[in-house]
Amino acid sequence: MYETFKKVMAQEFEMSDMGLMSYYLGLEVKQRNDGIFISQEAYARETLKKFKMMECNSVNTPIECGVKLSKDDGARKIDSLHFEVLLGVYGT
């Protein structure tokens, strides 16, 4: 899958292979033997600095506990075809 993605991207953009990815489009990418991990730790840190919140208390669960989630919340429906087309480009 990686090679297919790389080939498609090389056809569209001027590219060079620089080895393992560590940072891409604002996302930190850590590639290890047990998997690939993506985070926005640097972005979160910079946001906290910007708003002078580095000393604030952190929480493990950044969402209200006990809230019942519903599949149909009355919100605007998402066009799933848009995402299917994107996935089709990369052969998945």
Image (tube, rainbow, N blue to C red):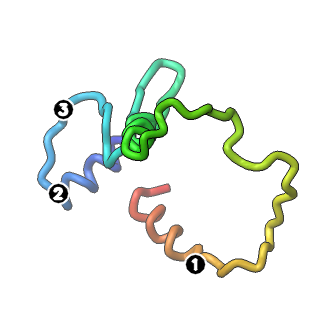
In x, y percent, where is residue 48?
A: 44, 40
Q: Please state which of residues 76 and 31 is positioned toward the viewer in this rendering.
A: 76
Q: Amino acid at mark 2?
A: Phe
Is any part of residue 73 visible from this angle? yes
- Circle 3 residues within 10 Å: few <14, some 14–19, many ≥20: few
Disc 3: which residue: 18
Question: 30 above or below 12?
Answer: above
In x, y percent, where is residue 33?
A: 48, 18
Q: Could you say which quadrant of the image residue 26 lies in? A: top left
Q: Residue at x 50, y 74 (%)?
A: 82
Secondary structure, mark 2, is loop
CA separation in Å, label 3 and label 2: 15 Å
Q: Could you say which quadrant of the image residue 1 lies in? A: top left
CA separation in Å, label 3 and label 1: 36 Å
Disc 2: which residue: 13
Which mark sits nearer the N-terminus, 3 or 2?
Answer: 2
Q: Could you say which quadrant of the image residue 56 lies in? A: top right
Q: Amino acid at mark 3?
A: Met
Task: Indicate left or right for 13 with 52 as reference.
Answer: left
